[in-house]
Structure formats: C-alpha cells, structure tokens
Amino acid sequence: MPEKMTMNNGETMIRINNLHKVFGQDLHVLRGIDLEVKTGEVVVILGPSGSGKSTLLRCINFLEEPTAGSIEIDGVVISAGERGKARDAHILEIRKKAGMCFQSFNLFPHMTAIENIIEGPITVLGQRKKEAIPYAEELLDWVGLTDKRDEHPSRLSGGQQQRVAIARSLAMRPKVMLFDEPTSALDPELVGEVVDVMERLAREGMTIIAVTHEMHFAKDVADRVFIMDGGNWIEDGPPEEIFTHPKHARSRQFLAHILK
C-alpha cells in the first residue's frame, strides 16, 4: 500500500466490552460480546447465517446502535446509550479510523472509479480535489486498476468494483479495515483478486476484522479465528487449532459443513 502501516506492536487497537444488540422487543442478536484486537492483527469471524457476525461489524462503526456495552478503536471510546455532540464527534472519528467493505460494493453509480475514491477525503476530511487525486491514483495502482480510473461502476466487473470499494475505504487512511463477506456477491473466478488485496493489506500491517467464508484467508492469513453462534462466541483460537481440533460440537458441525 502507498502508505506504510505500523506493524503489530502488541498495543490494543480495538476493544469491545460486553456488547449487546437487541432489535425490537426480543430479538437479542448480540449477547455480551467481548473482543480485543492488537495493532496489525488479523481476526476472522465465522459462523452460520443469522449468528450476529454482520451485526457485530455494523455496531463497531455505529451503522447499528449497540444496545449495551462499549467500543474502543485506537483510543476513542463510546458506550451504548451516550448522547450529545461529543458522542457524534466520536462516532465520526471512529468511522474515519475504521474503513468498511460490504457484500454489495455501494459505489456511486454516477461517479467514475477515481471520483468514488476521492469523495470521502473531500467531503469528510475537507481535502481539496487536487490534494485527493494523487493518493487516489496511488491506491488505484495498488489494487491493480490504474487503467479503470475513469470508468463508471457499470463498466467494471464485480471484483473490480470491490477493489475500487477497498481503495475508497483506504483513501480515508483508516487504522482498521472491517470486511463483511466482501466476496460473497462475486462470481467464483473473481474471488481471488479481492482476497489477494486483503492478503496484501494483512502483510503490510493493517488491523483487520473479516467476516468471510474464504477458508484460505482464514487458515493462512488470520492470526485468530472466532466462531459465533446465537450472538455468542463459541470458539476462538489460532486457525490451526480451530480447524484441526475444534472443541465445541456446534463448531465441529459448522466447520464440517463449510469445509466440504
């Protein structure tokens, strides 16, 4: 990546404490989640559909409002239930620090690739266009899409759109990247080009939390793997331990299904 990132120095980048999320009266999706992620660490979250994985990521950058608990990213702490202008400023700060890539690419269809990438730095960070463009061009080169600079999303493949979406997140110079099943909407032959970018981010020291069923990434790149079910962690540990000797019966059942 154009900017060299700080490699893992053992300091805590993300700390989640007793996080709960309840929808409506009784849909308890997250049930007291605790998680600590060190700088430069890669964490993969696995689990069946509906287990709470995506809700957790959305709570981390406050796309969903947590019901209880607290979230800390790079020293910025927000507790559920807080109100006021200071809290709004903290949420904006956390969103700057934590880039997010979704299943759907969410690119602006009327903007070219380069325009999509510079939109955040201009509107959120207050950069001038002439300041934002050179770094955006570096990022396009980094994700292998220099020749697609002036193309609109409709002219890009799904894999190319997702790589532009990653570059767009990186343009905000985040400390953390959150990936919510970034390859699930892609044709199988396009998955590799997105996973390759994720692997490069990991090698260069980006702190990553990824919800993904790409087992190669989970086995070979992750430092730790967590399995979620029913809004709780049921298993966590290094990938070689999780995939070789899962302790929980529900983990064994789930892994047997996805490792077929």
Image (cartoon, grey):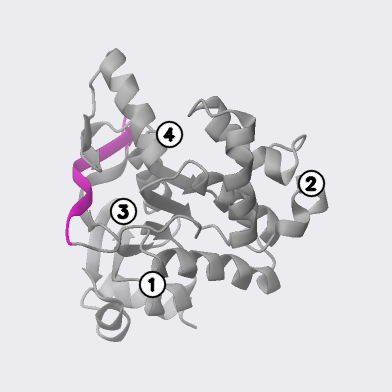
Q: Earlier in the sequence, mark 2 or mark 1?
A: 2
**Helix, strand or loop for disc 4:** loop
Residue 106 visible in the displayed image? no
In the displayed structure, 85 sits above or below 2; it is: above
Residue 96 drawn above or below residue 236: above
Q: CA distance from mark 3 to mark 4?
A: 20 Å
Q: Which residues are magenta?
A: 10-27
Please name the amino acid that badge 4 sits on.
Leu
| Left-right relation of 105 to 228 | right
Q: Earlier in the sequence, mark 1 or mark 4?
A: 4
Secondary structure, mark 3, is: loop
* Residue displayed at 48% across by 29% down: 125
Residue at the spot 25% in from the left edge and 54% down from the top edge: 232
N-terminal of the two: label 3 or label 4?
Answer: 4
Q: Residues within 10 Å of mark 1 (few under 14, many from 20)?
A: some
Q: Residue furthest bottom?
A: 244
Q: Is residue 3 visible?
A: yes
Residue topped by disc 3:
230
Asked if marks 2 and 3 touch (Cβ < 8 Å), the reply is: no
Q: Amino acid at mark 1?
A: Phe
Residue 220 in the image, given as x and y percentages of width and height? 40, 79
The residue drawn where x is 32% and y is 81% is 243
Observer-nearest of 102 and 134: 134
Task: Name the residue tied to disc 1.
Answer: 254
Residue 219 falls in image quadrant? bottom left
Give residue 63's mark.
4
For residue 223, what is the image quadrant?
bottom left
Please name which of the two marks, 2 or 4, marks the residue nearer to the observer. 2
- In whole angstroms, how far apart are the C-alphas of marks 3 and 1? 13 Å
Q: Which residue is mark 2?
A: 150
Judge left or right: residue 169 versus residue 4.
right
Q: CA distance from mark 2 to mark 4?
A: 30 Å
